[in-house]
Amino acid sequence: MYRNFRPFLKLIKHGIILGNLVPVIAGYLLALNLAENFNVSRFIATMIGISAIIASATIANNIIDRDIDRIMTRTQNRPLVNGDISLKTALILSIVAAIIGFYLLFVRVNTLAGIFALIGFIDYILLYSLIFKRNSTLSILVGSISGAVPPLVGYVAVSQQIDSNILFLFIIFATWQVAHSYAIALYRKKDYQSAKIPMAPLFLSLKRTQKEMALYVGAMAIATLLLALESFHFLAMQLLIIAITLYWLIDILRPIQTEESCWGRRQFLNSLLLIMAFCFTIMIDYLLTHLINIL
């Protein structure tokens, strides 16, 4: 049975969905830590809603990129390329998933959560996938907007307002997304060159790319510090989350002594470990706060 569903899991990029749910939960618990009691039905609606919207967007991206996916080694086995799923089926699934997702967020959660999700949806499909990805070195910056949306949706699902934490979360995840994408571009440079995708690091020297990544991670570190000081309850969690970010910054600034692709892969893995550790630190701070309240 799994084999029958595997093409559909590839189509929706289930790994990306699961990876994005972690920041959604982190944003949700961060707001909850400052606000009210846990609402199970709203939490479920938020998780399913944002999952459906991300699935819709990734399917749309598969549809748009099916020509270049045939060229790039790592994407040649995607279901729209090898014929496992038809274009019509993919289009229907994308539309249905979008309807379900936006209904849940706008109607069952709140309008602000729906608006943030809509901004990310439009940015990813229209601006990033259709316009900038193939035509501009600014594509990574444009795509970073949608990359920063999941924790914002989680946060406003509870807070129902825009405050300083929204700004901090946006800066943290947008700058992380840029540095993460730079690392991928270096790690998969040959693939992007063969598909003629003009990602910025392909046109920059490795030293310039390193400096730009350091600037973005530095901005992320500042926003992380401000978020931790304003919203975390435990000093240990404040210090931990700042230390994690500074570790990545220091590692980026170290002299590069390996091949470009190896260094890119190292920073790619660092970026994944960092963002997961960042999110789990928020979750631990929430759990410790409520455990102490119970005791």
Image (spheres, helix red, strand yellow):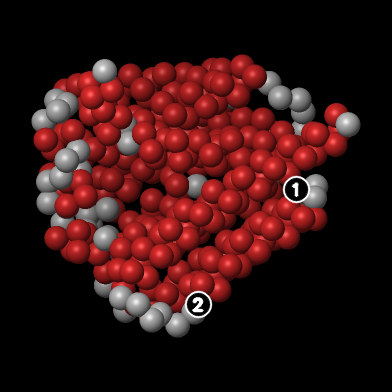
1 or 2: tag closer to the N-terminus: 1
Q: The N terminus lies in which quarter of the figure?
A: top left
Circles 1 and 2: CB distance less than 8 Å? no
User: Within the image, what quadrant is residue 124 found in?
Assistant: top left
Residue 89 is left or right of residue 285, and the answer is left
Q: The C terminus lies in which quarter of the figure?
A: top right
Task: Write down the residue under mark 2.
Answer: 253
Q: Residues within 10 Å of mark 1 (few under 14, many from 20)?
A: some
- 3D distance between C-alphas at marks 1 and 2: 29 Å
Image disc number at residue 231: 1
Q: Residues within 10 Å of mark 2 (few under 14, many from 20)?
A: few
Q: Secondary structure at mark 1?
A: helix
Residue 265 is left or right of residue 160, and the answer is left
Name the residue located 30 percent from the left edge and 68 percent from the top edge: 261
User: Within the image, what quadrant is residue 108 found in?
Assistant: top right
- Amino acid type shown at disc 2: Leu
Residue 290 is left or right of residue 162, and the answer is right
Give residue 243's position: percent from left, percent from top.
66, 64
Image disc number at residue 27: none
Name the residue located 51 percent from the left edge and 54 percent from the top edge: 273
- Amino acid type shown at disc 1: Ser
Give residue 66's position: percent from left, percent from top.
16, 41
Name the residue located 33 percent from the left edge and 69 percent from the top edge: 262
> In the image shown, does 40 or 50 lie closer to the viewer?
40
Q: Is residue 225 above or below residue 119?
A: below
Residue 198 makes an appearance in the image: no
> In the image shown, does 98 or 32 lie closer to the viewer?
32
